[in-house]
Amino acid sequence: MESTTIEFADELDTGQHQPPAGRRMKVLAAEDNPVFQSMLRTMLTKWGYDAVITRDGNEAWEHLRGEDAPRMAILDWMMPGLDGVELCRRVRSAPREPYIYILLLTARTDARDLVEGMEAGADDYLTKPFNAHELRVRLRAGRRILDLQEELLLAREALRVQATHDSLTRVLNRGSILETLQNELARAQREHQPIAVLLMDLDRFKLVNDTRGHLAGDAVLREATQRVQAAIRRYDSVGRYGGEEFLVVLPGCSGPAAGQQAERIRDAVASSLFLPGGEPLPVTCSIGVAWRNSPSVHDADQLIRESDLALYRAKDRGRNCVDAAPPVGEI
């Protein structure tokens, strides 16, 4: 193991350095010397970090590949088990999010050695002996980079949701629910499982817009989708197919089970009054059901056509009901 000297420069004694604002970030420090383990733990805790101290490279790797891995790591170049450079390579060879910022400690000062460490995946390095204040500001710089990355990830996720979800109801939009149907059909074909689709339409919805206004109509659409989402299983999918029509995909469901699920949704919508603008309003829906016991990836369009015809039959029967199309081969 390389010898380590830390120049504290009264860092631990003054009490003038307060922990950074916000949540405590985990920082892993790989160090096999008990004295320096204690020093690093004390410093990191004082600076507002949640210190995770490991005794060798193997233990550090177990933490870094875990589900709740530290966001920053201080790795000694030379230590028992995996050395710091090999740890860098392992972390970078398994791309993951969020990113782990790595600070490498080394007594080597040769430019070729430093290049090797950076090429292995280290983000920064400190040569020994190092000053505690320098370590602190290097960690602070690393945290700024991680905070920026987190903001970029949040922005990317917001753009993904915007591209795949309906802006009013927050359920999947037409393109995304059709893509979901194709994916579930492929899985159902592969696993020899049934699948069902429901086409749901809010009854006389135009009358809501005409008598209560479009803001009330929007509120009804949002409330209706919330009730549908509460009534379906966690692995079912719902999307806005168009206007007041919604498409629901039910993996592993066929026959009576699909009809029962449709009835649960119909009851969830009709069971209590809606309150757009604070004024009570009865809202019902009609649902058409179609399914396949032995689906094919090419069945999407036909399933939607069958559920659409079943929906029209439900409307003709007086609305607020469910109609199911017999599967192909049983018509």
Image: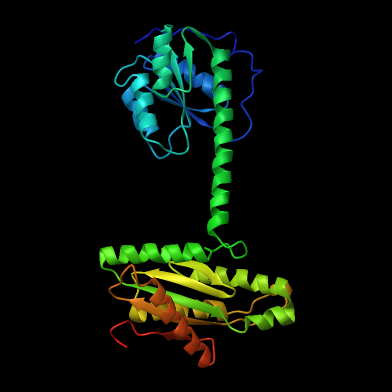
Q: Residue at x 43, y 19 (%)?
A: 118
Q: Is residue 24 visible?
A: no
Residue 87 lies in quadrant: top left
Residue 241 placement (x, y as % from top left): 53, 71
Q: Residue at x 66, y 18 (%)?
A: 16
Q: Is residue 86 above or below residue 172?
A: above
Q: Is residue 179 visible?
A: yes
Residue 262 lies in quadrant: bottom left
Numbered marks: total: 0
Residue 200 placement (x, y as % from top left): 51, 77
Residue 281 lies in quadrant: bottom right
Q: Is residue 325 above or below residue 219?
A: below
Residue 15 placement (x, y as % from top left): 64, 17
Quadrant, the N terminus: top left
Q: Residue at x 39, y 7 (%)?
A: 3
Relative depth, front residue between 160 and 224: 160
Quadrant, the C terminus: bottom left
- Left or right of residue 253: residue 312: right
Residue 31 placement (x, y as % from top left): 39, 18
Q: What is the image's colouring? A: rainbow
